[in-house]
């Protein structure tokens, strides 16, 4: 992670003592300023003039497009693309939508006078006249996404892809995949989209081989779709869904210390269709709430993974430990598998306080027993499950021998037994 994460530095100290809610409110409020700046730019005004030429599809048609091509971004008919200097690529399969197809019928009716009453002739019969009536009908029409066309470039704002590495990228992606309500996979998306959430197949596809930062951002975007927009009958507009998904991805990454403004702000602007940005303002609460939910899940997973890899270890010979606890620990040591290792496996024993301690040669194919630290002396477990004298006992005996020799005791203890 970057130097700062979750309002804390790497040592877990608060940088600004702000709560998560306060921090997220600041970040979501800043989205409005960023989007407004993009809307006021000259490049965006050029883009608007071009976008005005595209048809505005109904909610039902947007759902039909998403079901047939979930990665579609900008659609219109064959002739519409031709007028814009682009043509549909050979072999491309069109996206079927429902288009209005009104037609007129002629019908003979009574002629009405200025007073609204039927006009009659000299015989008192109603005068007839023929009128045309328009009957509303619908037909299937074919449209194509911009990714299915080629030719004159369309104006655009922002960057095509954000670049950058993400600290602990593999770990973060594992966490995101685990929290996703649907499977996440990588593939080569032919349309050029960065990713999509398939509403019918209930899965997420991410374009492979993108930068780490773009991949994480896209994954967060699609996971938000899966979390919030699985119900296609909710009545939410496509603009609202995209604002919530991109806004959440942007805020989560910014909270973690990563900046995606150059990509996210223009994206959000494209779906802020009203002049006073009412759609974006209405989405801020959902963005803030969803961001907090995702951040909590990430922090929880990171914490659990850290504890699994770094379990709390309490030293067995801690200063000030209760004597009964020490005695129990010693008893457990004697009965441990390491304490029952064959004595012949010992290849060398050396005191930490002396580099001149003699080495004991043993067969090279033996495995050195596990070492334990007691005080300042590094020792090996007993070779006979505690039945043979330990190294400390042996050292004490040797020490007594030296003392007795220096004292002229002829190598005998107080009872006259040879030692």
Image (spheres, rainbow, N blue to C red):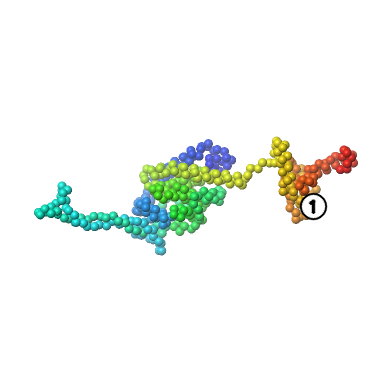
The residue sitting at 37% across, 43% down in the picture is 276
- How many labels sit on residues? 1
| Image coords of residue 289 (percent x, y) | 46, 42
| Image coords of residue 378 (percent x, y) | 74, 44
Specify the farthest residue to the bottom. Answer: 91
The residue sitting at 39% across, 55% down in the picture is 64
**In the image, is 255 to the left or to the right of 79?**
right
Secondary-structure class at tag 1: loop
The residue sitting at 21% across, 56% down in the picture is 107
**In the image, is 162 to the left or to the right of 362?**
left
* Residue 153 shows in this picture: no
**In the image, is 300 to the left or to the right of 110?**
right
Q: Quick one: quadrant of the C terminus?
A: top right
| Image coords of residue 59 (percent x, y) | 37, 51
Specify the farthest residue to the left. Answer: 122
173 or 312, nearer to the observer: 312
* Residue 212 shows in this picture: yes
The residue sitting at 36% across, 56% down in the picture is 97
79 or 402, nearer to the observer: 402
Q: Which residue, given by chain and number where applicable, does mark 1 sit on?
A: 361
**In the image, is 181 to the left or to the right of 57?**
right
Q: Quick check: 206 above or below 247? A: below
Q: Quick check: 414 above or below 45? A: above
| Image coords of residue 70 (percent x, y) | 43, 55
């Amino acid at each position: 992670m970057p130097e700062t994460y979750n309002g804390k530095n790497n040592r877990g100290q608060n940088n600004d003592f702000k709560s998560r809610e306060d921090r997220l409110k600041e970040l979501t409020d800043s989205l409005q300023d960023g989007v407004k700046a993009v809307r006021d730019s000259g490049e965006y005004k050029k883009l608007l003039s071009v976008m005005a030429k595209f048809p505005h599809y109904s909610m039902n048609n947007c759902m039909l497009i998403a079901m047939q091509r979930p990665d579609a971004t900008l659609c219109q008919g064959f002739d519409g693309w031709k007028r814009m200097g682009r043509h549909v690529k050979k072999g491309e399969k069109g996206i079927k939508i429902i288009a209005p197809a009104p037609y007129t019928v002629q019908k003979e009716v009574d002629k009405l006078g200025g007073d609204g009453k039927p006009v009659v002739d000299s015989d008192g019969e109603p005068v007839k006249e023929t009128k045309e009536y328009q009957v509303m009908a619908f037909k299937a029409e074919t449209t194509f996404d911009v990714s299915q066309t080629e030719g004159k470039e369309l104006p655009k704002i922002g960057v095509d892809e954000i670049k950058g590495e993400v600290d602990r990228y593999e770990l973060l992606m594992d966490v995101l995949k685990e929290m996703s309500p649907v499977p996440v996979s990588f593939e080569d998306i032919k349309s050029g989209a960065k990713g999509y959430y398939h509403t019918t197949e209930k899965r997420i596809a991410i374009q492979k081989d993108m930068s780490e930062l773009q991949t994480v951002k896209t994954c967060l975007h699609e996971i938000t779709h899966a979390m919030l927009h699985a119900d296609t009958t909710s009545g939410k507009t496509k603009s609202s869904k995209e604002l919530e998904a991109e806004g959440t991805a942007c805020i989560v990454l910014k909270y973690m210390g990563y900046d995606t403004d150059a990509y996210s702000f223009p994206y959000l602007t494209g779906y802020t269709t009203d002049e006073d940005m009412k759609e974006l303002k209405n989405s801020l609460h959902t963005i803030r709430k969803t961001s907090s939910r995702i951040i909590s899940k990430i922090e929880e997973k990171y914490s659990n993974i850290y504890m699994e890899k770094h379990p709390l270890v309490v030293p067995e010979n801690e200063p000030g430990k209760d004597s009964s606890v020490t005695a129990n620990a010693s008893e457990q040591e004697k009965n441990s598998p390491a304490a029952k290792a064959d004595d012949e496996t010992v290849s060398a024993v050396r005191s930490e306080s002396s580099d001149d301690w003699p080495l004991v040669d043993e067969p090279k194919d033996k495995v050195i027993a596990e070492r334990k630290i007691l005080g300042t002396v590094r020792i090996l477990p007993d070779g006979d499950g505690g039945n043979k004298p330990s190294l400390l006992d042996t050292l004490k005996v040797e020490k007594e021998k030296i003392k007795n020799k220096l004292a002229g005791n002829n190598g005998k203890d107080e009872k006259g037994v040879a030692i």
